[in-house]
Amino acid sequence: MKIEQIYTGCLAEAAYYLESNGEAIIIDPLRESAPYLERAEKNGAKIKYILETHFHADFVSGHIDLAEKSGATIVFGPTAKPAYQAHVATDGEILKFGNAQIVVLHTPGHTMESSTFLLRDDSGKDIAIFTGDTLFIGDVGRPDLVQKVKAEITPDYLAGLLFDSLQNKIMPLANEVIVYPGHGAGSACGKNMSKETTDTLGHQKEVNYALQPGLSKAQFIKEVTDGLVEPPQYFPHNVLMNILGGMPPIDEVIKLGTAPLAPAAFQLIQEVESALIIDTRKKDDFTKAFIPGSIFIGIDDSFAPWVGTLITNLKQPILIVVEEGREEEVVLRLSRVGYDNAKGYLKGGISAWNNAGLPIDSIADMDANEFASFYLTNQSVNLLDVRRESEFKSQHLLGAENFPLDFINANMSHIQPNETYYLHCAGGYRSVIAASILKARGFNNLVNILGGFKLLSETTIPKTSYTCPTTML
């Protein structure tokens, strides 16, 4: 029997390939079907089932496209109501593949249909659980993503269901059972996930706060609902896409999005279709020269989650500025979070744009040490710390204002276009995103601090922090 975790770091998402005696199962596939089809073909196996642990919020699943190409059956847990052909399993139902079997365990709490898939070998021994967003390594799924479906489905209600699911379905399993979760650290589907992406259930019973034997249901509900921040705005849109289906085939999305466009054609599409230009190059290259009005979201970091967080219209026409050879990667990562309307990329990049005599913009950069010397004698300057509130509260520069990138669209009215602002984040990525958005909205006096708080914290600028109460988290 083969178990392979296919982990995609930029989304902190884990899909799984299981195989036994010539039959395979895919669990929670991403949008692209090729990696799963190629694995099965290489091993001479046929994909029998595509298992979905729940309707995902943080990415668009590739289950429909994969089912059409492989002939496999899509399987959801109890209560799921997909708008396309799929098998909705009953609690405790057994799915056989090869010499192994999957037991469907209905584990509501993260969502109502959330299910855990228990793998048994040919002797009937429990081997592993594929928990989706029910149980993570060091954490559990957040219970606040579907509360708007019905008035009675509140975070507290879902947290109570999650407690029951863990106590009645997960905890009774043997300690040696391996836990394979749907996400790792960096995902917005939980609060305190470990960097590890697998563990034994026995060890999780020892170290995971949510599985402690003395934890009451009331205490559990308080712990998992405390400190939750507003989820990224694209989450409900992705849920609907995963429920309703109807997305264009990924091959068509990639073909359209990777169309090479000369500068004149690129500019025409921008003007006629009000297309948003996303510049995915390295941040240092972007600040030196970019197309006016374009937004920086670099491909070499958490690209797709930031696209989903910041671009509110999933149908927005998008044009791409990208390093040569990475066009398909960018389009694919856009499609993973539901942005299927990429119209092409700038052939020849910024050099071609510049050679065509078209306008170029830039953002000023300042070295951390240079800014420290300046700030110590000019502490009345506007310093925006674009890290998350939790990071800011942990430690920040004295006099800085927290201006989280996550909520820049909502908070932009709190600053003035005619003022000069100095921006920093933790390492320099998010501050360039923030600066590019502000520049596109008419804030022209911006300075990006190179290296972010990581370097600023090593200077002599005074720092402060909050004292937070200790919790089980």
Image: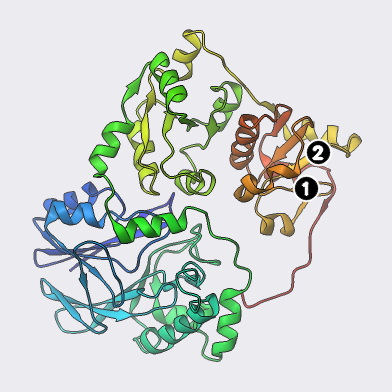
Circle on res. 418: none
Q: 44 or 381: which is nearer to us?
A: 381
Helix, strand or loop status at disc 2: strand
**Is disc 2 surrounded by few (<14), some (14 to 19) or many (20+) residues within 10 Å?**
some
User: What amino acid type should be assigned to the residue bearing mark 1?
Assistant: Glu
Classify 403 as above or below 292. Answer: below
Q: Residue at x 37, y 89 (%)?
A: 172
Q: Position of residue 230 (x, y in %)?
A: 58, 61
Where does the C terminus fall, quadrant-wise? bottom right
Q: Amino acid at mark 2?
A: Asn
Residues at badges 2 and 1 in contact (C-beta under 8 Å)? Answer: yes
* Residue name at image x 56 percent, y 32 percent: 283
Q: Which residue is mark 2?
A: 382
**On-image quarter of the N terminus:** bottom left
* Secondary structure found at label 1: strand
Q: Please indicate whether residue 117 sits to the left or right of residue 300 in the image.
A: left
Image height check: is 14 above or below 382? below
